[in-house]
Amino acid sequence: MGYPASDANLHKVASLAQRLFKLQPADHGRSSVFERELNAGEDGVEFGADLIFQPPSRFLVDSLLDNDDLLEGPPSSRHDGWHDLDHGYSNSTYHHAVVDRRKLSLEWLSNACDRIVKECASQLSRDELAMAICRVLNSDKPGEEIAGDLLDLVGVSAFEAVQDLMLHRKELVDAIHQGLLMLKSDKTASNTQLRMPSYGTQVTVQTESERQIDKLRRKEEKRYKRGAENRVEDDLSATNFSSLLRASERRSPIEDLFGHGQGPNSLAVTALPQGTLRKHFKGYEEVIIPPTPTAPMKPGEKLIEIQELDGFAQAAFRGYKSLNRIQSQIFQTTYYTNENILVCAPTGAGKTNIAMIAILHEIGQHFRDGYLHKDEFKIVYVAPMKALAAEVTSAFSHRLSPLNMTVRELTGDMQLSKNELEETQMIVTTPEKWDVITRKSSDMSLSMLVKLLIIDEVHLLNDERGAVIEALVARTLRQVESTQTMIRIVGLSATLPSYLEVAQFLRVNPETGLFFFDSSYRPVPLAQQYIGISEHNFVARNALLNEICYNKVVDSLRQGHQAMVFVHSRKDTAKTAEKLVELSRMNEDLELFKNETHPQFSLIKKEVQKSRNKDLIGFFESGVGIHHAGMLRSDRGLTERLFSDGLIKVLVCTATLAWGVNLPAHTVVIKGTQLYDPKAGGWRDLGMLDVMQIFGRAGRPQFDKSGEGIIITSHDKLAYYLRLLTSQLPIESQFISSLKDNLNAEVALGTVTNVKEACLWLGYTYLSVRMKLNPLAYGIGWDEVMADPSLSSKQRALVTEAARALDKAKMIRFDEKSGNFSCTELGRIASHFYIQYSSVETYNEMLRPHMNDSEVIDMIANSSEFENIQVREEEQNELEMLARTSCPLEVKGGPSNKHGKISILIQLYISRGSIDSFSLVSDAAYISASLARIVRALFEICLRRGWCEMTSFMLEYCKAVDRQIWPHQHPLRQFDKDLSADILRKLEERGADLDRLQEMQEKDIGALIRYAPGGKLVKQYLGYFPWVQLSAAVSPITRTVLKVDLLITPDFVWKDRFHGAAQRWWILVEDSENDHIYHSELFMLTKRMSRGEPQKLSFTIPIFEPHPPQYFIRAVSDSWLQSEAFYTISFQNLQLPEARTSHTELLDLRPLPVTSLGNRTYESLYNFSHFNPIQTQTFHVLYHTDNNVLLGAPTGSGKTISAELAILHLFNTQPDMKVIYIAPLKAIVRERMNDWRKRLVSQLGKQMVEMTGDHTPDLMALMSADIIISTPEKWDGISRNWHSRSYVTKVGLMILDEIHLLGADRGPILEVIVSRMRYISSQTERSVRFIGLSTALANAGDLADWLGVGETGLFNFKPSVRPVPLEVHIQGYPGKYYCPRMNSMNKPAYAAICTHSPTKPVLIFVSSRRQTRLTALDLIQYAASDEHPRQFLSMPEEVLQMILSQVTDQNLRHTLQFGIGLHHAGLNDKDRSLIEELFANNKIQVLVCTSTLAWGVNLPAHLVIIKGTEYYDGKAKRYVDFPITDILQMMGRAGRPQYDQHGKAVILVHEPKKSFYKKFLYEPFPVESSLKEQLHDHINAEIVSGTICHKEDALHYLTWTYFFRRLVVNPAYYGLEDTAPEILSSYLSRLVQDTFEDLEDSGCIKMNDDGVEPLMLGSIASQYYLSYMTVSMFGSNIGPDTSLEVFLHILSGASEFDELPVRHNEENYNEALSKNVPYMVDNNRLDDPHVKANLLFQAHFSQLELPISDYVTDLKSVLDQSIRIIQAMIDICANSGWLSSTITCMHLLQMVMQGLWYDKDSSLWMLPCMSSDLVSSLGKKGISSVQQLLDLPKANIQTVLEGFPASRISQAYLLTMEVPTVFTFQDLQHFPRVQVKLKVQKSDTDGGTFSLNIKLAKMNSNRKTSRAFAPRFPKIKDEAWWLVLGNPSNSELYAVKRVSFSDRLVTHMELPSTPTNIEVSKHHRSLFPVLFSSVYLKVLDFLLLSKFLQGPAPTLMGGCVAL
């Protein structure tokens, strides 16, 4: 072998091989056999002659050649009989020859030279000597000459060294060649197309006889003598030794097989199966591998019968008897466990069914109560090709249909809407598509539902697309770990050698989840033929290729089999078919192909003739078919049918057939392995995946005993394919190449935020697994591995390098010092649109604010997505022609330039041009696939940069690409399927644009296009073209900010076919002067909106000095070309408010001591010694004067104590006067009550009362109170009747807290009560002192003026004047959708806690209860993944357990264990106060709360995080912004005066709003009035109270308001153009007139010439504090005999329920409820608050389980509101004299109180422990009401209840009271027993009218309370009664009286005036008084009045009692 080799040595090699073979397990089917059948006597180079023999590495043999012992390595037994290699860097490796393997390397040569240099004192250095030796060894001289040359070099003293060199010359030369090849491949790596070099791919041949070994040796020597390679000499001379040495140690990924040796010669180990034949022919060589016999069944191995599966699973296996062997072996693990699994098995082994078994296991977990819970899970099946995805989808859809499972495809071709995704349980997708989806945080909710991820063809990891699978798996595994939810991963792959590493990567347990099956498990054994053509001449090679292909096909046909020939282009199918037919004619074999004897031949022939495909018809005659994706679907289907029916014997097809259609044949021929890849821009080899898939089609399971796979390739690729298909190519990771893009995607998703996390993420990839096992393949030297075995520094280096590159491209911001990453808009766009990093660099360079069309197309052509597209000589002519005919734009660089070619193809795509040449078709298809997303990404980039012109331009191009219509073409071309090309062409020629067409009549259009009927058609489609009308109201907020209310009115006919479910419009506000976009948002117009009223959008925009002439608001359709609307905002006449913000300077005063109060009692109220600077500065005015004061200072600056100073001053000077403290929220009232009760009241001996919706004090309490704390509404209601309420006029001090809330929703009430109090003060001439407290204000002067505050009383400090300075961080987050955006903020929130406040208290404000829960759970998860799950908890375990036992809320109990509290209105008071206490005492560190906490509870924290600044507005049906005041209030909670030097606030906002918040959080916000919107109700109240009697009174009233002050200052905000006195007075006059007219129309007031007077409806609205709209609706809908159902609808329709939130997706809950309630609701309006209110009432009466906790809280608020509304309804009925309606309405009130149906439920259900058993039992004993029970003696009750020891009731509704669960006599004591005495008296004075005297007395001696027993009503109520006097015969009502009493009561009612009525009543039972309870249900009993005039007094239980 290049030197004389001794026969003895060769003999040893052979015998060793023989013995190794004997060591193989005998029964194993795949055992490699070292026998060889060789055809002797053939000339030419023998196959395998140049290959090195190595044993299979599954044995680790450590022995020298002359040692006869063979040592077997430790076999680790696998369940399929494999023996594994220990995956360490084992030294026990096999040796070729006498010298240890490491001596075979150049390293050994280097060491030898080192010794020679030292010992022999050589003139050369070590490296020079080694290089010289290399040149000598590599020369072609005979052995003797080489030995002589070596001796000359090293000297005679080193004779032994020369001997060694000569002995191992072959190995050293191989090492030299290896090094040279590596160096060469480094040079050519940049432009080479071959992914894996073909060196080192030798296949080992083993022989048994010496004769053959001799033959091998002779051939080898001949070859070495012949083939002198001068080229290698040249290479050697140009190389230095050290680089050669390093290169020889590196290996290509291909070489790494099982073993991991350490020398350059550790070439791959392979073994061909037993019986392999090799044949030589002229020009080609053939290797025949016989089919591997099927392995026999092992003892104990049995097939699983389908009937062993669960019933539901059998449905999916219909038609199957049993599973096959592979499926049976994996069944136990797959079906009964949740283990991740990896199955490596040959193609066609039934891996689809393995996936099915895993799917059925998952379905089984969600199959409960005989019902599949489909909304709980999603299954994702990732298939590598779109064609395969389509096949899988159809197969699984069909098989899972019995289980009612929806399976859908989601690929580039098949998009799914959000709804479709929600309805789908199994998604079949491609890796790229699933990557895009999981990259977006907006689709997080989808990926969170995934419970099973099936990855088909995992060996794709080796392909360049493998990186995508790595990214997916890493993302999934991290999601599993971070969320602690189970996602099972099932990997399916072909037989692959490095299955252990792949299993490790997929987190598969090798003991239980890893299954490996070799080719002996193929259902149909496969014979393989590998043919390598060595002919070099192109023409001859092609002819030979066709000839071989033909011969193979004919061989198959002769045996009676069908054959498939796979080619690699559509054109080639026809060419090859033609060639086959031609050759068959020449060889006279045509009969073999034809199939005319088939019984159906003539029938089918007719069908084929119908096809329009000429090739198909022509070839059918010859029995040949073609099949490719370019054919029509019908033709493809026909061909498939013909082949499967045997009418076609030979089918020539492209590889798509192997993927997309399951059509097997006995013989499969792959003709040529070069295919054109537009992505690589050239020819590449057919990949492993395709070959396996194609070979998988060989052999038809039902018919064949074996199949045949033939691959015809070039000779140099032969060895590569042999190794590939004998499964001996290790799989390497391709991740490094796309590391930058994947890192950017993770940063954009928010899962990687710093270098540490990025390294962790990298640890989940296959790269990290392979890098450790084969470092050299990834450019890591052994020295690095030794220094850092875990390779963590290498990972860090990879990450840092990628991050730096991304930072440079502005895709992320990388702070090298801290290692933190933050995402940029650019990075996010690149991630979402799948744009490569290198493309972004190109755009950064080329994108400018102004570009023309051809520059833009050229920039797109420069995208790296297209960088591999090549320019070819043969395409030039066609490209030039296309540039002339189909390209409207200039082509930069022309067709000969690469970018010019791409530019032509882009334009061609938009122009819908056609192409001839095949490579151009491929390139064009490749370009068009990526074009749309690139253009969209560029549009987003321009939009984010705020460039007007480029944004519009790119949006037009997005639509142009989507529609394939140029922007300059006629927009009606978008209807080109419906309008003829002729019409469109004429419209373009005549220049008829849309505006002109809109104005024209049908006949004019017909005339214009010279086709009359066309006119009507054009006009019709004009109506479908999407137009919108815009109008806007612009209100200046300050001189620099405008508020815009935009109205969008759709103006087109909605047709689903064109418009789908929704149309998207971009709303852009542009300043064309400065080319800048100031606001952009995406508006969704749904079909429902398009029919309704105009849609309103509100937003703010900045305005700058000097003002530009105008802004444009544009609405541009996202999908329709030229569909846009304009609105111009002109600044010509816009009056801006004055820019005067006067701030009070904080003086540098010495802090006042508390002793300045001069009163010991007062001093003791405070636990500090000195007042703070603000209190010091305001002290004198507040404590020593009576001046009104307005104090504006930031939250947390001690304003409350300032207010207390004013109270103390009042107590000093006017102790008999009252203090009224108005707080805008109940929560603040509660806080103030608690605080003052503890301090002020108790120590000063004063009385204090609370007035809120929850607490209404009685008159006595109000009279005696010194301090009244109230909400604005309550005080408004009380002070409306101030004439009759003396305590209102006794107010001496009014404190208005948070007065800046004037601008908020409830501001008008605040405004009215202040104006009213000032008016009262002016009327009674008693001065009322006003103290206004607020945050820093921009227009404090106006507020002060309105409050009557003079200069001395105005203090307006800057926002920065805080006792604890505040540091604010504002971070923007993108994302159109609210929930995913909130989700993406959780990790930054956690990071903020760790950064800013790792140990101090943290408050997190969110918008809803649901968000409190989700945020807390995510924080727990992040803390757990940081391995500090309880870092926020600081209390011992036993204390924690004690606290948890007291908590009722489940979610709270869970989060508390981790030190995180929840706080929202849905918690009960006990839980809420417990949480507040824990947080205040630092027992828990984090409190997640809704915004109300900012106002209500003074719980400051070191850090405040505001997570999102929007909340869902149920009325507007969308998310709207919190008022700025709320945000300021939340920020104000940051910084604890006692503990912190400074506070911190982190505000996480939606990206577009970031600049708005930056502006207003640092400068005060002006307060505007919102009284104008709510003027009607307040004017009505003043008319009722008598304050307003004329129009002049109303105008006078308005001048008292704040609205009037602001109207003068900022007129434009209120729609007034000028403030001239006459304009102002006419504006106000018109406003009052309009209000009066509206009130008159609604029946509330009556206008006459000289004034206005209130009517009944107006009085009721004012009395019950209802909207005038509500009473007007009552007035028009309630009639004399209104039914209960109608009353319920009327009640629900009250405008008080307008604000009831209908949250996201709640219409689904409403739909479910509507099916379970008795009365129907409008199913088209399930998202309407009034419908929801109706459903809540009905659910309350039916005692239904409510779907979510939010509904329980909503029900509380609905029930609470309903009481006053129903009382108003009763008043309206009573005033109208309608008896029946009044009584029905009273029943409704009883139903609300008791939560029962009046007409359906027994009153027994009011008892706390009633059950249906008990009700029916009592019914049998004749007891059907509580009244009857009450009448029974105590002893009898016990006998009645025998057998019911402890009946129980559902606790769901017992909202307030602890109710016992055992029914006793005591329960009856809850109900009052009332005795009624009546007496009719005639009055002497009033002309003898009759009155009825009534005495009421309660008979329950031991019942002391008058509190109502209503356990299902959420609030505590007192009993109340109605006395009703009416006539049932004519349903007339005479009188109603409402009474309440605790013990007894005497009252009287006037009887109707004519005494005859009473006489009549004695006979006709006509007149009757009834006692009705407002609380208790049932029973009405009409009793005659006369009975009571004579008989004894009855005793009655409440309900309604007839008298």
Image: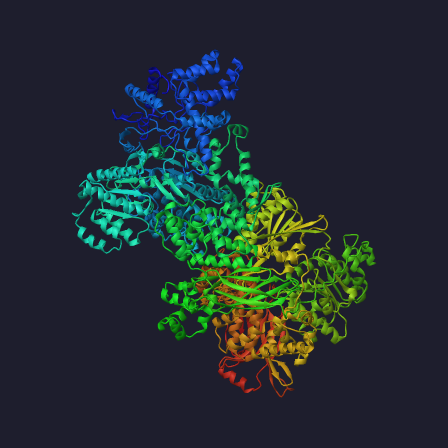
Query: Quick one: 774 or 1889, which is closer to the camera?
Result: 774
Question: Residue at point 64% right, 56% down?
Answer: 1558
Residue 600 shows in the view: no
Question: Residue at point 73% right, 69% down?
Answer: 1345
Q: Can you say which quadrant of the picture contains the N terminus?
A: top left
Q: How is the image coloured?
A: rainbow
Q: Position of residue 968 (x, y in %)?
A: 45, 62
Query: Quick one: 1777 or 555, which is closer to the camera?
Result: 555
In this view, 798 is above or below 1574: above
> How many marks do you count on the picture?
0
Q: Can you say which quadrant of the picture contains the C terminus?
A: bottom right
Residue 1684 as seen in the image, left or right of residue 579: right
Question: Residue at point 48% right, 45% down?
Answer: 485
Residue 190 shows in the view: yes
Q: Position of residue 171 (x, y in %)?
A: 41, 22
Q: Position of residue 1667 (x, y in %)?
A: 58, 72
Residue 997 as seen in the image, left or right of residue 1043: left
Query: Quick one: 60 or 268, which is closer to the camera?
Result: 268
Q: Residue furthest top?
A: 157
Q: Position of residue 1832 (x, y in %)?
A: 51, 65
In this view, 603 is above or below 322: below
Query: Quick one: 155 or 1394, which is closer to the camera?
Result: 155
In this view, 1291 is above or below 1583: above
Residue 1553 as seen in the image, left or right of residue 1819: right
In this view, 1014 is above or below 651: below
Q: Name which quarter of the figure residue 1643 lies in.
A: bottom right
